[in-house]
Amino acid sequence: MPLPESTSTAAPSPAPRGLAATCVRQVKRELAIARRRGSEWINPLLFQALVIVLFPLGISPEPALLATLAPGLLWVTALLAVLLSLDALFRSDFDDGSLEQMLLSPQPLPALCLAKTFAHWLLTGVPLSLIAPLLGLLLSLPAAGVATLMAALLLGSATFSLIGAVGAALTVSLPRGGVLLSLLILPFYIPVLIFGAGAVNAAIVGDPVAAPMALLGAMLALAIAGAPFAIAGALRISVDG
Amino acid sequence: MRGKQIGMWKFIHKLGSPKWCYQLCGRLQPAFWIAAAVLLAVGAVWSLAFSPPDYQMGDSYRIIYVHVPAAILAQSVFLAMTFASVVFLVWKIKLADMAASVMAPFGAAMTLLGLFSGAVWGIPTWGTWWTWDARLTSMLIQLFIYIGIIALRGAFARPEQGAKAVAVLTLVGVVNIPIIKYSVSWWNTLHQPATFTLTERPAMPESMWMPLLLMVLGFYCFFTALTLYRLRSEILKRESRTRWVREAVK
């Protein structure tokens, strides 16, 4: 007897797929959902843009002052935008039962979690890095820092997605997990913020950026190695209890 | 050898039993309370009245006798919680989770005490309450991690689910411990390097570091005694449906 297939996953498949193929499908599925529900990935970008607009109006429109604040402001607002998108990461899958299907899948759960987090990064971290130069213009960010800002945001936002997914997985079964999620996750974001903003500041004053970029890369490597297992463990706890 | 091994396993197996652990904690507790009282009393009087003042900082350096033990405990308690979390996740021993849950508030309190005593000490020596120094920042992060752990446990309606979630978060949070430990070596900071190391003699005279050592040991004994005391209450609370608890509290 054929089992009822979940709506958002692919058509019934007689032969079991390989791990790589499953991960590719997982990413494609996330992208398809994002295409149909655009607000989920566009809203964090709008949020960041709006918050950036508040600073010149709230502090001072003085270009020299804004230029000194720009690297930190762009990083902090990008961090908050990622945080805003995290609550939805597992929420709808948890509500409609797709998360249980993922847990029941014969493929290793950490690999599927990594694929899901990769899709989250494609939908938040990459767009945030792409609009960063534009928002930098609003804050009179010196041109010397733009390339470093984009590269550092690409690396750092991937770490944000991985660490954030652990928190999202831990709190997905809680009805109002949003505020708790920020309390759990923000302390772990601080090192990334320090070196990310540090890299941009170094680029602006003409210092070598290799050291902070290497540290951002090291933190990403550590997160890739460790976070998928923590996400998988946390999802099992949230779903099975 | 064989018999010894079997004896050890029997001990660990017994330790997993709440009733036996409750009784063991009760037997060990007085010794740790007495040790803590003696060490803290001797250490406090020695450090405040008899150890010489510092040639640069004068008497204000005596804050070290609270600051260093609190900061050491803040990290040791987290390591103990990490160990308990591993035991809980791997062997599903509920007592390990009870131990982790009673240790967390003490760790948070010690982190806060370390930060507060450091801020008070900062005024006479650095001329400021706070500076965004690597050691201070990483300790502040540690405080937020402790608070997050306590908050996460409280958020779950089912305690067993909260216990597992907290154990995972503790394992993730332990990455901050080496950052705190090496923050003074990796970055050029205002904060001085570690006071005690296992391999070298402290850079201060014996009349200064001996009372400090007593204070550190006293803090450890106090932590152990308090943990045993609170673990007993926690066991009674969680095992309140069993017959032996009903008989014990009758």
Image (spheres, grey):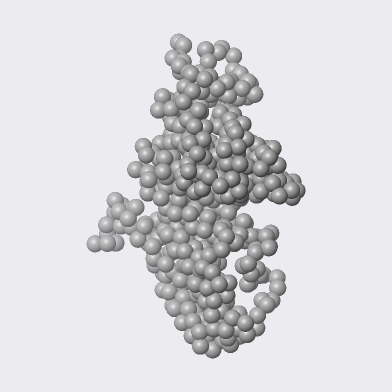
Across and down, in percent, residue A161 comes to 56, 37
Q: Residue furthest left?
A: B250
Q: Residue furthest front?
A: A62
Quarter of the figure that contains the N terminus of chain B: bottom right
Across and down, in percent, residue B48 comes to 50, 84
Could one spot residue B65 in this view of the protein? Answer: no
Q: Is residue A129 left or right of residue B233?
A: right
Across and down, in percent, residue B70 comes to 51, 68
- Number of numbered discs: 0
Give the residue drawn at x 55%, y 45%.
A73
Give the residue drawn at x 47%, y 64%.
B112
Across and down, in percent, residue A20 comes to 64, 24
**Is residue B170 or residue B37 the one in the foreground?**
B170
Give the residue drawn at x 37%, y 49%.
B154
Could one spot residue B233 in this view of the protein? Answer: yes
**Is residue B195 or residue A127 the one in the foreground?**
A127
Above or below A89: residue A12: above
Q: Residue furthest top?
A: A1
Identify the image quadrant of residue B184.
Answer: bottom right
Give the residue drawn at x 24%, y 62%.
B250
**Is residue B234 or residue B172 the one in the foreground?**
B172
Above or below A147: residue B126: below
